[in-house]
Amino acid sequence: MSSKELLLQHVRERLISQNYSFEEFLQTIGQTYRSRHESEPEIDTVRDWYSKYEFQDEAALEVADDRIDKFLEQNREAELQELENMQLAESFPLEQVVNKLYQVDQMLDKRLTYMNEALKENVLQLERFDDLLDLANSTKVDENEDMKAVENLHDKLKIQKSEER
């Protein structure tokens, strides 16, 4: 049973025409009428009164139905708004995400550029070392010459390092 049906059932149970049958209504009115007028009320008059209560009860039930609908709709809207606000508070705007991704891209691009420059520098050093090894291998004649070539190579590397600084 839905919330609306439960609320309408509760209202319906409180209506006179739902709590009293015509016979019970006639008996209650008859007791009150007799205590004041010392006669029996006319059944047609009591039936008319009961019909008016039924009509009023139906009108009251329709009003209650409309009010319940309105209340439940307002409640649903408030709940949805609260849920939306909670979701917005816990999420990031698309623009912020795009900006952060752009910043990450810039940082990665700088890092890649740095690594590329470092790699180029290492390649140049290796090329120089290869040239020096070629020079050392082409000038050696015997073992004494090997030691001189290594010392010569060592001196040239020192010179290149000091030039780079």
Image (cartoon, rainbow, N blue to C red):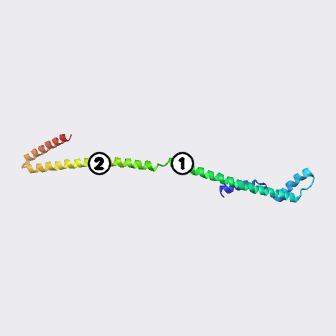
The secondary structure type at the circle numbered 1 is: helix
Name the residue carrying label 2.
113
**Quadrant of the image for the C terminus?**
top left
Q: Identify the disc placed on residue 95.
A: none
For the residues labelled 2 and 1, say whether their Cβ atoms are less than 8 Å apart.
no
In front of the other: 55 or 155: 55
Amino acid carrying label 2: it is Thr
Q: Identify the disc placed on residue 85.
A: 1
Amino acid carrying label 1: it is Asn
The secondary structure type at the circle numbered 2 is: helix
Q: Position of residue 109 (x, y in %)?
A: 32, 49
Residue shown at 68% from the left, 52% from the top:
67
Q: Position of residue 125 (x, y in %)?
A: 20, 47
Tell me if 139 is positioned left or right of 77 in this view. Answer: left
- Is residue 24 shown to the viewer in this render? no
- Classify mark 1: residues with Cα within 10 Å, few (<14), some (14-19) or many (20+): few
Quadrant in the picture for residue 158: top left
Q: Position of residue 120 (x, y in %)?
A: 23, 49
**Quadrant of the image for the N terminus?**
bottom right
In front of the other: 99 or 79: 99
User: Marks 2/1: CA distance?
Assistant: 43 Å
